[in-house]
Structures are given as structure tokens and as C-alpha cells.
Amino acid sequence: MATFAPPATEDRKPIRTFRDLKVWEKAFNLAVDVHRLTTGFPREAPPALCQGLHESSVAMTTHIAQGHTHSYLKDFLRCLDASLAALSDLETRILLARSLDLISRENSLKLEERIAEVRRMEWGLVNRLRARDGATGARS
């Protein structure tokens, strides 16, 4: 199996580390905001929900970073799939927190929009990598 080099960014700068990936930056900032948001949860909030929000927000970010370190495209794609799964987990937990009145409708909608943006960016990266490498099964 051939190794691959991640694509260059839109401004054609080479991607040397995961920090150069715009999708990682967006996911990281989302994770930071989720952590900040949960500090305002009341003491009665289910601890497992707060912990789960932390875990899924960290997981979506770290899977992107881990994937970038792999030498093989299929391994990077596997990590991006795991990141997308963590993103869906995060979205579900945010919806649950909203239903339990732990976060406002406004904050929930803002987070959902940002989750959708990260999801679009991740699928865009997945599809670009698959197309460039001639892999099949691209999905959006």
C-alpha cells in the first residue's frame, strides 16, 4: 500500500502537522467552547452527560490529529470516520442537554451550526482524499 501526503490548504501551503488542518482548528475551537459551556452547568446536572460532552468533543479533535500522523490513507480515513462518529455523539449529547434545559436554545443552535460546519469540512476532506487517491465509496 502506498503512503500519501495530505493535500495542501486552500492557500497552497503544505500541511505539515495536524494543526495546519482547518478542520482540526474548527473542531478544536468547538471542543474548547463545549468545555467552557459545561462549566456553567448546575451541580444537579448529570455528571455522565457533562463527562460525555467532554469526551466526545475531545475525541472528534484527537481522531483528526491522530489520523494525520498515519502513513496510509486508509488509516487516516478510519480516523476521520471515528471523528465523525464522535461528532454525532457530541451532537446527540448537546440535544440531550438542551432537552434537560442545561443549555439555552440559542447556545444549542449555535453549537449545532458549528457541528454541521465541522461535519461538512470533514466529509470534504474525506472525499478529496478518496478522489485524489482513486479510492471508492465517497460520501457526503
Image (spheres, grey):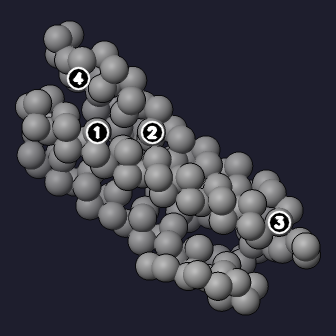
Q: Is residue 7 left or right of residue 44?
A: right
Residue 1: give x, y in percent of width and height.
Answer: 91, 73
Given the image, on which type of amino acid does mark 3 rest?
A: Tyr
The answer to whether the residues at label 4 and label 2 have Cβ atoms under 8 Å apart is no
Q: Residues within 10 Å of mark 4 (few under 14, many from 20)?
A: few
Give x and y (percent) for residue 16.
79, 63
Please say if 52 is above or below 5.
Answer: above
Amino acid type indicated by mark 2: Ser
CA distance for labels 3 and 4: 41 Å
Provide the secondary structure element on which disc 2 rests.
Answer: helix
What residue sits 83% from the left and 66% below the top?
72
C-alpha separation, residue under disc 1 versus residue under disc 2: 9 Å
115 over 52 or under it: above or below: below
Q: Nearer the viewer, mark 3 or mark 4?
A: 3
From the viewer's perspective, is 38 left or right of 69? left
- Residue plotted at (86% across, 62% down): 71
Mark 1 closeness class: few <14, some 14–19, many ≥20 residues within 10 Å: some
Q: Which residue is mark 2?
A: 56
Judging by the rendered image, the residue that carries numbered circle 1 is 93
Q: Quadrant of residue 140?
A: bottom left
Q: Quadrant of residue 36?
A: top left
Q: Nearer the viewer, mark 1 or mark 4?
A: 1
Secondary element at tag 1: helix
Q: Which quadrant of the view contains residue 43?
A: top left
Disc 4 element: loop
Q: CA distance from mark 4 to mark 2?
A: 18 Å
Tell me, yes or no, whether the two marked residues, 1 and 2, touch with CB atoms within 8 Å.
yes
Structural distance between the alpha carbons of marks 2 and 3: 25 Å
The residue wearing badge 4 is 40
